[in-house]
Amino acid sequence: MDWTKDKKGNATSDDKPEDDFFAEAKKKILEQIADRLARDRSFHLCSITGNPKVGKTGLVLDCRTEEEIEKGMKILVLDFDNGAEPTWDSAWDRDKDIVIFNPIKVRVDGSTDWEETFNNANYFCAYAKELIEEGNVKAFCLDGVDKAFEGSSDVLRELLVKQQTREGSIVKATDSVRVSTLDWKIRNRIYNRLLDLVCNLQCDRFLITHMKPVYDNINVPTPVGEIPDWHKSTPARFIQMIHIDKVSRMDGDKEHTSYIAKLTASKTNPKLVGKEWTIFTTNGENKWFGISELREGKL
C-alpha cells in the first residue's frame, strides 16, 4: 500500500478500501465494543493444573450457578484427555447441557491420527463459536492441554518421517528423525493455533493439564519437583490460574482426603491470589463443594 501525507501531515493511501469494506469493518468493531460494554464482567480465561483424579474436570463442570443451570446454559468440553464422560455421568446425571466431544481419531492399527484429530478439534471450536453466538453457552473447556501438546509433536514427527523418507535419510522405522529449530516452529504453530481458537471464544474458558516431573540431572531419575505439562509459552495466555492438590491424613485406621484448590494468579481479582478452597472431601462420605467465586465469575 502506497502511503503518503496530505497537506496537514496526516497519513493517506492511494488505494483506499472500498466504502462497503470499511463499513463492514467498522460494524464489526462497533459490535465488539458494544458486546464488551454489555457484559457485567470479563470472561474467565483460567488454567487448572494438578495430578490425575484431583477434581480438575469436576471443577469446570461445576462452573454454572443454579440460575444458569435452570436457564440451560451450556458447558462445552473438548476432551483430548478422554476422561470427562465419567464425571458427567456420575456427578451430573448425563446433563444434556454439558456437551463433551472427544476429537481423537484412531487408525485401524491403533495409532492416533493426530492430523485428523486436530482437524476435529478445530471443527468443534467452530461449532462452539456458533453456539456461543446464540447466547446460551457459559463455558468452554480444553481438557488435556498436555495431550494436545504431545499430539502436535507427533504431527511434526510424521511430517518429518515422510519428508526424510523421500530424501532417503530414513530407510528403517528405527532410524532417528532429524529435527531443526525451524521444524519445532511447525509443532508450535499447530499447538498455538488450537489454543488461539479456544482462547478467543467469547465465553468463560478453562484449560486443563496434568503435571510433569522436573529433574536436576537427567542422569538421576529422582524428580525434584513438578510443573504443568504444556509448552513453556502457555501460561502467558491466562487471566486466572488454579492448582489442585490432594491432601491425605490418617485418623486412627481411617484415611481422610481433601482436595485443595489454590488460586495462584488473577488479573481480575488479585486480592484473591493465594486463597485456597476445599473443593472435595472423602472423609467417610464424598462431599463436593467447588468454588462459589468461579461459578459467579469473581475469580
Image: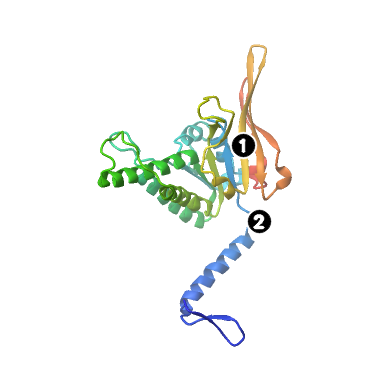
Look at the image and tell me in which quarter the C terminus lies. Answer: top right
Q: Mark number for residue 267?
A: none
Label 2: which secondary element: loop
Label 1: which secondary element: strand
At label 1, the amino acid type is His
Residue sitting at x 28%, y 42%: 169
Question: Among all residues in the image, which is located at the extreme bottom?
Answer: 7
Q: Label 2 to label 1, Cα distance in Å?
A: 26 Å
Residue sitting at x 59%, y 42%: 63
Q: Is residue 167 left or right of residue 202?
A: left
Q: Which residue is mark 1?
A: 243
At label 2, the amino acid type is Asp
Q: How is the image coloured?
A: rainbow
In the rendered image, residue 31, in percent from the top left (x then y), is placed at 56, 66
Label 2 crowding class (10 Å Cα cut-off): few <14, some 14-19, many 20+?
few
Inspect this view and state whether residue 222 appears. yes
Q: Which residue is mark 2?
A: 40
Residue sitting at x 30%, y 45%: 164
Picture quarter containing residue 259? top right
Q: Closer to us: mark 2 or mark 1? A: 1
**In the depicted structure, whether residue 195 falls above or below residue 248:** below
- Is 240 or 77 nearer to us in this picture? 240
